[in-house]
Amino acid sequence: MFKTLRLSTLLKIVLVLSLLYIFLLGIKFTGTSFKLFGQDFAENLISMYSNPFCGLFTGILVTSIIQSSSTTTSLIVGLAGSGVLPIEAAIPMVMGANMGTTITNVLVSLTFITRKEDFRRAFTAATMHDFFNIFTILVFFPLEMTFHIIEKSALFLTDVFQGVGGVTFTSPLKLVIDPVARGFQHFLADTFGVSDVVVGIVMLVMAIALVIFSLIYLVKTMRSLVINTTERVIDKYIFRNIFTAFMLGMLLTAVVQSSSVTTSMIVPLVAAGFLALDRAYPFTLGANIGTTITAILASLATISSDNGASVTTIGLTVALSHLVFNIYGTIIFLPLRKIPIYCATRLGNVAAESKKWAFIFVIGVFFILPLLIVFLTR
């Protein structure tokens, strides 16, 4: 009987890993689909607007569409590095990108909408990331426009990194996810001879199906693995305190190179009751810092020893501004974590009682408000 129990547990662990892979593949399909019919739009939209206030909401809108702050910031770094965007316009866009990427967490939480208590916890876990960004933007956007503190800090770090170049890094996640995504994309294009837009639409539909399927069964399987000790293991060893949760989020995201993936992974844990908000929050802040590594490495790889103060160095400055923005936000709102957690909890309670508020929040914050601001300030 003991062997049977061990075999059952092992099979469930394998199932969890398989479902996690399907979930990550769905996230990858989502990003790929929008890039197929959205990247030119994203680049044109970014290059059209140089007003800082408009740039902030353009960053939110574009990243909400692409669902990857790494992609958006890489575009911004490239445009700044090529001289299309000045630093003053690029930094607000980076702030917006940091906000826009949180839409993935919220969309993941919506898969729990039919189960009231699970949805309450999931939506709270997802939106506390939004409130962190909202409060950080409210503090640092006016300070940046007035005193340029993020730009000056990023310029200082740029001087430190001067002469460092040729750095490359390949995410192990990409090694197992990207070939499948590319293979499926090429299969659709080669077999049916359809356009990139059609391939993107098919992949988006597949992404939604994969994410919903994987999350539903992932939570069910994880719950069945609980034998009085799972919650204790997660709380005491993996997320045993604020520091370990923060470092885990930062290091894991630096490896995975996608905060959308790592932060959305903890939404099911909170929804299932395995992870408390006061541990999920520092993990999320760590992930915010970890995701900045992608753009920094990309910008470092473009710097050669004879560039001097060239535009490629400006690209590095913009990439470092993403890091500085998140560090400053963490310094303030990690000690003051009760503020964003309280706001997210209240919103989660409201959304659980009336589901329409969840959709109003998503559509309003990530699409209607940015579109309105961009239209009015262009």
Image: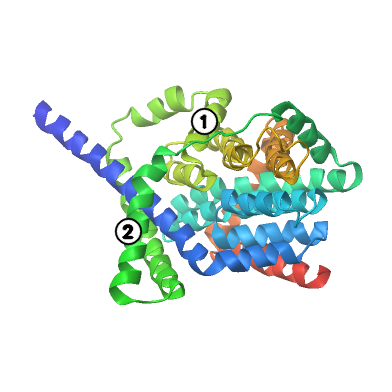
Scheme by which the image is coloured = rainbow
Q: Quadrant of the C terminus?
A: bottom right
Asked whether 16 or 123 is in front, the reply is 16
Q: Position of residue 322 (x, y in %)?
A: 69, 42
**53 displayed left or right of 305:** right
Q: Which residue is mark 1?
A: 251
Asked whether 364 or 370 is in front, the reply is 370
Q: Amino acid at mark 2?
A: Gly
* Label ID, residue 183: 2
**102 displayed left or right of 108:** right
Q: Quadrant of the N terminus?
A: top left
Judged from the image, the secondary structure of the residue bearing numbered disc 2 is helix
Among the two numbered marks 2 and 1 on one chain, the one whose residue lies closer to the N terminus: 2
The picture quadrant where one finds residue 329 is: top right
From this viewpoint, is residue 346 visible?
A: no
Q: Residue furthest right?
A: 146
The picture quadrant where one finds residue 367 is: bottom right
